[in-house]
């Protein structure tokens, strides 16, 4: 859709943008349109940088949709001041982050849709990178197939900055959670149709569930080891206790036959951030090796569960009571990551 219907309760505060002036963008043959969607509430301090990063994109057609949740800190005034560069914006009530995000995604007109947080900002060549990646694999940008482009991100935590390359998205991801920056994902409209909307009952890991649903639906995946976004760590995802609890919900949803103690045993065996499990230490099996061996004996007929366990090489845990850490990254992989980081840092400095 090109604009949201009126709020039934009449609480919409504002609506505007280029679309309301009859200026609608669309992709053209060989020329993808990249849609950036931003949901925001009370981000007056960071939103200008986000808006500026979209406006600065070159080498690709872009549009920007902004959905505000009735901010009261001056955010709406900032949005209205930038109305000439925003394709559509609205300020109205919502039922939470993912409800607002579902609204925003429904408004995208592009060949690719990317979620851009109000405290993050794009790299200078983000849209061009995504467009080129799509054109390499997709002959029809007017009606592209269900596909996710998984780009890299600069993860920012205080003064530290690391190159976050997209991890594997496979059957094992149900137990270890996807190691992918959601804000570096570019999805075709057909991918969103395949996955359905974000699940608003989850406050933190609805994006992980969305990625895993795409995997289950057979959406094509393309890894693009090129950073397209500066991602600010923290926010809702910084609530590590809730993150672990919601990851347990994901495991239970995927494998509904599992008992609660089996779900938590699997988390203690495979959840990637082991220190975050400390509040749930009482739910850890006394011997993880024995636990997994007995679980496989009981649940060996569950093909989906066995696929996840095999992807994670569960046999490495056999004979070990305490958790066995996954293999360290090899020297070649470390060297590649280091060289990629240096290259992209140099490139960013050159563009800047």
Image (spheres, rainbow, N blue to C red):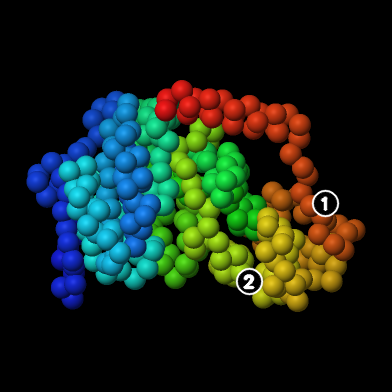
x, y percent for residue 277: 70, 66
- Quarter of the image that includes the C terminus: top left
Please indicate, yes or no, whether residue 73 appears anywhere in the rendered image.
Answer: yes
Quadrant position of residue 290: bottom right
Please say if 337 is above or below 307: above
x, y percent for residue 288: 82, 64
Instruction: Identify the residue position indicated by label 2 in the image.
Output: 257
Residue at figure coordinates x 30%, y 55% from the top left: 104
Residue at figure coordinates x 23%, y 62% from the top left: 91
Residue found at the very far right of the displayed protein: 319
How crowded pointer 1 is (Cα within 10 Å; few <14, some 14-19, many 20+) is rated as some
Please indicate, yes or no, whether residue 89 appears anywhere in the rendered image.
Answer: no
Q: Viewed as shown, does residue 148 lie left or right of 335? A: left
For this rendering, which residue is in front, 214 or 328? Answer: 328
Q: Viewed as shown, does residue 320 lie left or right of 176? A: right
Please say if 279 is above or below 204: below
For this rendering, which residue is in front, 272 or 297? Answer: 272
Residue at figure coordinates x 70%, y 73% from the top left: 280
Instruction: Identify the residue position indicated by label 1 in the image.
Output: 316
Number of the front mark, 1 or 2:
1
């Amino acid at each position: 859709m090109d604009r949201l219907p009126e709020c039934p309760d009449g609480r919409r505060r504002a609506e505007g943008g280029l679309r309301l002036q009859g200026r609608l963008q669309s992709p053209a043959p060989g020329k993808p349109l990249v849609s950036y969607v931003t949901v925001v509430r009370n981000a007056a301090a960071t939103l200008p940088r986000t808006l500026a990063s979209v406006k600065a994109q070159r080498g690709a057609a872009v549009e920007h949709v902004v959905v505000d949740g009735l901010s009261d800190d001056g955010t709406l005034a900032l949005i209205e001041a930038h109305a000439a560069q925003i394709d559509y914006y609205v300020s109205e009530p919502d039922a939470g982050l993912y409800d607002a995000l579902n609204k925003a995604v429904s408004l995208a007109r592009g060949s690719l849709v990317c979620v851009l947080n109000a405290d993050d900002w794009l790299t200078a060549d983000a849209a061009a990178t995504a467009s080129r990646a799509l054109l390499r694999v997709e002959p029809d940008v007017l009606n592209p197939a269900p596909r996710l482009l998984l780009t890299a991100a600069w993860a920012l935590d205080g003064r530290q900055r690391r190159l976050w390359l997209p991890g594997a998205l496979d059957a094992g991801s149900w137990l270890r959670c996807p190691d992918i920056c959601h804000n570096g994902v570019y999805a075709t409209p057909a991918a969103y149709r395949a996955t359905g909307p974000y699940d608003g009952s989850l406050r933190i890991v609805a994006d992980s569930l969305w990625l895993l649903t795409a995997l289950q639906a057979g959406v094509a995946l393309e890894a693009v080891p090129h950073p397209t976004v500066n991602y600010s760590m923290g926010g809702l995802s910084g609530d590590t206790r809730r993150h672990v609890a919601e990851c347990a919900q994901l495991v239970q949803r995927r494998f509904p036959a599992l008992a609660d103690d089996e779900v938590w045993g699997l988390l203690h065996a495979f959840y990637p951030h082991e220190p975050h499990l400390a509040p749930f230490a009482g739910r850890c099996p006394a011997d993880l090796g024995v636990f997994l061996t007995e679980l496989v004996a009981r649940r060996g007929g569950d093909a989906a569960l066995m696929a996840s366990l095999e992807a994670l090489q569960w046999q490495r845990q056999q004979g070990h009571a305490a958790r066995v850490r996954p293999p360290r990254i090899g020297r070649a992989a470390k060297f590649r990551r280091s060289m990629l980081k240096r290259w992209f840092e140099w490139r960013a400095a050159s563009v800047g």
